[in-house]
Amino acid sequence: MRELERDSSTDPPACRRVAIIGRGRLGNALAEALTGPRFEVIGPLGRDWAPCNADAVLLCVPDSEIAFAASAIEPGPLVGHCSGATGLSALAPHEAFSMHPLMTVTERGARFDGAGAAVAGGTPRALRLATELALAVGLRPVEIADHDRAAYHAAASIASNFLVTLEAAAERLAATAGVNRELLVALVRATIDNWASLGPEQALTGPVVRGDTATVARQRAAVAERAPELLSLFDALTDATRSLASEKVLA
């Protein structure tokens, strides 16, 4: 893995006319973010798009549809995808690239500036285009090899998707005590800020790291009584937190 340096904005782009295929959240967000003088964006187009003399085609479609969508494109333009877990082989036989924004995209869109992006290219020109597209929307491109993509994407899922699942569990349990989501938000944000600035060992607080087994036992009993469906999650997280706390002590 290596973070790629920012190219000069005065250099001509590797490709100028970029067609975006896919009218979902990411396709719409990238089409909007790429608006500017550096690229001529065509789309986002539907999956029944017709040839449009594009220099490059960026597929913003589900992972399971990438290979099929790529096979429908006549040879000529560079072809890329926005999948985090998929390698370049799905785009064969095209000159292939990929650019995966390390950012969550909702119905409201996304703010890409400052976020990471996994990029790859089958040729130097393809890698340059992936890098330029990432930089054009404010992302920090990092080259990720095909054999590392599944691990990279799993880390992204833990950091984003699983965090939402975890906070949903906290919200559900808090509701049994009359505490709503809004009262948890400041705690969550402070925790994220501490993790970002201090690292996991120094950011960790609470009864597990203090060795307060009696409090942890009372917490577990409350979970078992009020939200038993969360008990296995609570136990797994307690064990993982205990391991992290031991690393903090050893450090």
Image: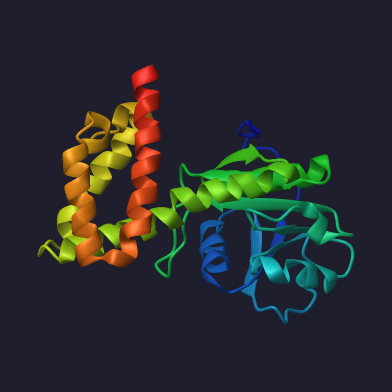
Is 32 rendered above or below residue 163? below
- Farthest left residue in view: 178
Q: Residue at x 73, y 67 (%)?
A: 66
Image quadrant containing the N terminus: top right
Q: Residue at x 18, y 60 (%)?
A: 174
Residue 78 seen: no
Splitting the image into 4 quarters, where does residue 166 fall? Answer: bottom left
Q: Residue at x 56, y 50 (%)?
A: 154
Q: Position of residue 191 (x, y in %)?
A: 27, 40
Is 39 rendered above or below residue 215? below
Residue 92 seen: yes
Is 115 rendered above or below residue 74? above
Tell me: 215 left or right of 89.
left
Q: Position of residue 197 (x, y in %)?
A: 34, 29
Report the number of numbered marks: 0
Splitting the image into 4 quarters, where does residue 27 fall? Answer: bottom right
